[in-house]
Image (cartoon, helix red, strand yellow):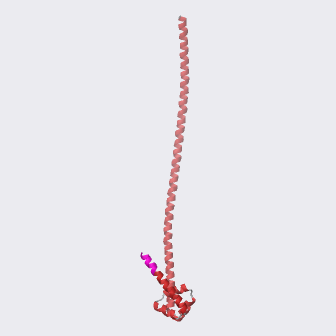
Amino acid sequence: MKFIVGILLLFVNLYSLDCTYIFEEKKQEMNKKIQELDEAKQALESYQAAFNALQDEKIKKNENILEQIQKEKEEILKTKEENKKILEQAQKLQNDILKLKEDKISQSYAKMKDASAAEILSALDENEAVKILLSLEAKKIATILAKMDANKAASLTHLIKEKKENKKESKEENKD
């Protein structure tokens, strides 16, 4: 019986040594897996940090581009306003020149003899003749029309009347 107990003890001892060996192997495998997981975690954190840095760089770059676009937009609007002012000044100058030209023409016809003015105005396009006549005093218009052919004078009188009526209507519309 001692022999059986001795053999049993030997098997138990051998089994315990075998279990310890198996546990040590499993422990080493688990430590190896833990180390691999730690390395993977560090790699992931490193990748995440690099990704975040790249994202931050792109965001800053886009913000700079957006800021530059905003500055250019402001410059364009400023230039547009300046161009608008220049255009308004140019139009004003053009209107002033046109008015001076019309005034010179009016002065010329006002100083002309009625018969000469009537002859020239008869030869002009009716709309141009009406513009010139409207720039003169009523007394001068009457004397010039009196020196013209009756049909031409009637036609010009009709156009003068229409122009004056159109001016009245447009003034009344502007008041409303």
Q: Quadrant of residue 7?
A: top right
Residue drawn at (55%, 24%), measured in percent from left and top? 26
Residue lying furthest right in this view? 123
Residue lying furthest top in this view? 1
Does the image show residue 21? yes
Question: Which is the main secondary structure of the residues drawn in magenta?
Answer: helix
Instruction: Locate residue 13, reporting x and y percent.
Output: 53, 13
Residue drawn at (51%, 87%), measured in percent from left and top? 158
Does the image show residue 113? no
Residue 137, relative to residue 26: is it above or below?
A: below
Image quarter in which the C terminus is found: bottom left
Q: How many marks?
A: 0
The boundaries of the magenta stretch are: 168-176
Instruction: Locate residue 102, reporting x and y percent.
Output: 51, 84
Q: 117 or 54, which lies in front?
A: 117
Residue 151 counted in the magenta span: no
Residue drawn at (52%, 42%), measured in percent from left and top? 48
Q: 129 or 69, which lies in front?
A: 129
Instruction: Locate residue 77, reporting x and y percent.
Output: 49, 65
Q: 46 or 79, which lies in front?
A: 79
Residue 32, relative to residue 78: is it above or below?
A: above
Instruction: Locate residue 88, reporting x and y percent.
Output: 49, 73
Residue lying furthest left in this view? 175
Residue drawn at (45%, 79%), measured in percent from left and top? 169
